[in-house]
Amino acid sequence: MKAALFDGKHLKIEEIEEPLMTETQVLVKVKAVGICGTDIAIYKGHLPTPTPIILGHEFSGEIVKIGKKVDSFWLNKRVTAEINANIDFTCFYCQRAMYTQCISRKALGIDINGALAEYIALDSYLIHEIPDKISFEEATFIEPLAAAFQTFVMMPVDKDDKVIAIFGLGKLGLLLAQVALLKGLEVIVIDGSDKKLNMTKKWGAHHLINRFKCKEIPEEIKKLTKNLGADIVVDTSGNPDSLHNVVKSCRTRGKIHIKSTHGLEVLMNLTDIVVREITIYSSRCGPFELAIQGLESGKIQVKSLISNVTKISEVEEVFNSYNKNKDQIKTIIRF
């Protein structure tokens, strides 16, 4: 099969053997893979991974073979999959149903081979059926949309939380903006792309701030919030330098939620955080059921987030393009 192998410096298309299945796994013929910010961080060398490795963890496909211990229901089903494989189901976290934090877990496309290949073998407990209303391309948004919903699973929203500021309108930030609007929050979005900012305006975002045109983002946010700052500030920017403004934009006793996984060391004003008693949250993988419901119902829109659909032979060019176009949101590799 064809696969995009990352050797630590380059992505090379190579012919390799199809993955071997165990009796509890399924073999998925990959149909579409979305390029994620984490993939880009690995490619840039910011997030160390074992190499060579097949990247890609936002994907969809069709099950073409099942192991002996897998229910025949799954054969030929359209599916996507969660990314935390190698779950032991016995550790401290698994005993408390925190499977995404299993001590033994290995993340697809990060720790072990992922989906930028014609086929991928998956443990059957990872798979989720894709409803007919959701295309293979749209289904590549299920994993990041689940992560957007997880923001509010991990972080309670209380009666005083009215305003949320979202730094960074990549794919995750744009999904999070839609989820925040569903939650009834007043949404402030911050990004350097007018195209992305205007996209959120069509959905109902209340205030748009272009970071290239605004000299003092925290001061602008305070003007919009009776000089308090946002009740909740979320970083999805992937830019470690943004955290300075993230902290300053949060009101005293407010909440900061970190979503970026860029792999870089960051500086935060911990003294300000402690003195103003700001609470810091973080989260990653989330509930696929909520994400699938959001897409199937039409309450979450993703078609406009697809910047380009191309083939695997163009994959390294696609990865390099993310440095050149601030309006690019998500490119999908279609098999």
Image (cartoon, rainbow, N blue to C red):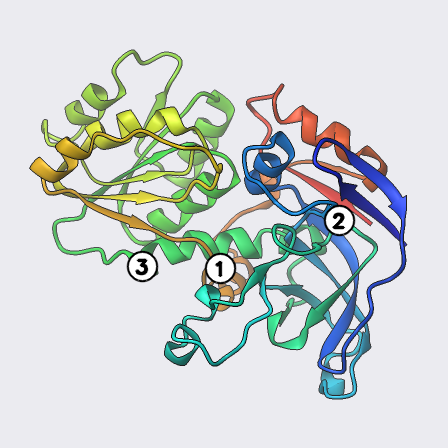
Residue 202 placement: quadrant = top left
Q: Which residue is mark 3?
A: 154
Going by the numbered disc 2, the residue's amino acid type is Leu
Going by the numbered disc 1, the residue's amino acid type is Gly
Disc 2 residue crowd, few under 14, some 14–19, many 20+, Cα 10 Å: many
Residue 12 percent coordinates (x, y): 82, 37
- Nearer to us: label 1 or label 2: 2
Which element carries disc 3, helix, strand or loop? helix
- Is residue 299 visible in the rendered image? The answer is no
Residue 32 percent coordinates (x, y): 74, 51
Q: Earlier in the sequence, mark 2 or mark 3?
A: 2
- Tag 1 and tag 2, C-beta contact below 8 Å: no
Residue drawn at x 31%, y 14% as measured from the top left = 214
Q: Is residue 59 left or right of residue 249?
A: right
Which element carries disc 1, helix, strand or loop? helix
User: Which mark is on residue 37?
Assistant: none
Identify whether 103 is placed above or below 35. below
Q: Nearer the viewer, residue 153 or 27?
A: 27
Q: Which residue is mark 2?
A: 116
Q: Earlier in the sequence, mark 1 or mark 3?
A: 3
User: Which mark is on residue 294?
Assistant: 1
The CA span between labels 1 and 3 is: 18 Å
Identify whether 56 is placed above or below 132. above
Residue 98 placement: quadrant = bottom left
Going by the numbered disc 3, the residue's amino acid type is Met
Residue drawn at x 28%, y 26% as measured from the top left = 244
Q: Nearer the viewer, residue 24 or 203?
A: 24
Residue 57 percent coordinates (x, y): 63, 53
Residue drawn at x 49%, y 36% as measured from the top left = 262
The CA span between labels 1 and 2 is: 26 Å
